[in-house]
Image: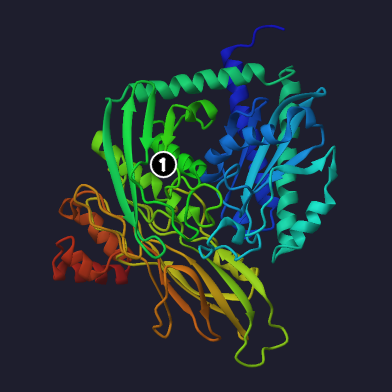
Amino acid sequence: MNQISQVAYQVMWNRLISVVEEQAQALVRTAFSTSVREAGDLSAGVYNDQGEMLAQAVTGTPGHVNAMADAVGHFIRRIGRDNMYEGDVYITNDPWEGTGHLHDITVVTPSFYQSQLIGFFACTAHIVDIGGRGFGADANSVYEEGLYIPIMKFAERGSVDQTLIKLIRGNVREPDQLVGDVYALETCNEVGHRRLIDMLSEFNLSNLDGISRFIMENSRAATLARINALTPGTADGHMRIDGYTNPIDLHVKLSIEQDRMHCDWEGTSGLDKKGINVPLVYTKAYTCYALKCAIAPDIPNNAASLAPFEITAPENSIVNAVHPAPVALRHVIGHMVPDTVYDALDKLLPNTVPAEGAGSLCNFQVSLRPRSDEDAPEDAVRSEVLTFNSGGSGARPTLDGMNATAFPSGVMTMPVEATEQVGPVIIWRKELRQDSGGGGQYRGGLGQHMEVGAREGHEFDIQAMFDRVDHPARGRRGGHNGAPTTIAQDDGTPMQGKGKQFVPHGRKVIMAFPGGAGYGEPASRSKQQVCSDLANGYISKQMAIDTYGLSSAEASDVLQRSKNGDSI
């Protein structure tokens, strides 16, 4: 065979990224759960025959993709190479060998070409229900959190394990939805495999060995070049967040060294009794993501580009929970990891990282049922409705924060129409939250207001999964804090930021999601930007006056011109 040029390998690398993106889009189109179809809470990737990730889809969340980078190695070890056949499909939701909690199902498919194992395709999706206590932090161990599927064969030589299907269906609240999602995961891997075989045929290749070496060598070299261009140093980062019943302290020591960056989470709070603990694989995923975003955002994610970022944490700390710790809401803590890393990195690389944002997703799950205080109408039903929502992201060194945008998870906010379609839930209000973005030279992103209730004849439990109630996002370089989270019933009954809580028939839950923090002194913000924010309703007249120094007359003039449709 003629030697393949560097240009040809680069074309193949780009093709692989396109292959896994098509794989991810196939999952979006075929999934049953709204968390996948609408929010994009998924990942997809292709791996070489050693289980090293070669490429990941653009669509997806780093908590899945970066965690899944380690997962395929566990599948190879558990299944055994001698027990892998064409037509096989493997499955797990093991939090420690998958992506961090039981609600994520990972499916891995070996890829054969000309009867030889050449690699693997893997994908992950968050499913709405896995049985147990439901999606929430109330469990005291992983055994209470739902059905556990060890790494095993979902199908062997094309034949699906029907006993496994029966066990799954018998242990979850939404069996059709879950089984449908598993088949969607299997199908998307098959789509990726077909496209890979097309590529191999087109380039007259028999395996992935050459392109794998090219990707690994160039990715590692490029990442090391970025690290070694930085000034070596060490700095500490800290963040205090709400926790479940007691505050949680995250501590990290970040070191920039020759050929590596090391993050050590020594000093972080220990395990919590409730399900907000984080397996180390998830901590690694978001720590690596934070570092790559800051210093090497344009280098594609793969095993080699992630390897120079080394992550350690004490066993049985909240960021290195071991079995059988409850971990269902590991994202609430895990999504705070990047901002903690940035607290340290800002001391080493000033004017590089954003201010703190909302961090964790503002998720809640509604468990609806016919009202119990009196007779319910005949059409009242039981239903599980999960919705993903976002607060504001932190302001950046040269830009405002993004409104209602999930950083670091990257998942999308679910449309009201999609949420109301899957059960008897009503979203009465969903809009940007004025004044929630912290003031600064660059303003923090806005959070959201939401009001949620049920259709006539229903009551419900709401599983709250919020943070930033007591510890809002902190500003950077003189920027102001973002607004905190609030939650209560519409009659004023206070509610907790986390946990399952009953909402009687006719009541609504009123929520205000947190804003991102500001960057730089508010006095340095241009008057034109302040006036624009006021005209757009992002800030109130009072905030324009108190935070940014606009006079009352100036603020009134801006509002009047905005009302008249005049330019600001």
Q: Residue at x 51, y 31 (%)?
A: 300
Query: Residue 86 versus residue 150: which sits nearer the camera?
Result: 150
The residue that label 1 is drawn on is 314
Residue 343 versus residue 416 in the image, above or below: above
Left or right of 520? Residue 166 is right
Q: Residue at x 44, y 57 (%)?
A: 272
Callout 1, which amino acid?
Answer: Pro
Residue 397 screen position, x and y as percent: 27, 43
Which image quadrant is residue 205 in?
top right
Residue 247 screen position, x and y as percent: 34, 60
Q: Quadrant of the N terminus?
A: top right
**Secondary structure beneath label 1:** loop
Residue 56 screen position, x and y as percent: 58, 35
Q: Few, some or many C-alpha atoms within 10 Å of disc 1 (few <14, some 14-19, many ≥20)?
A: some
Residue 250 visible in rendering: yes
Left or right of 513? Residue 166 is right
Left or right of 201? Residue 514 is left
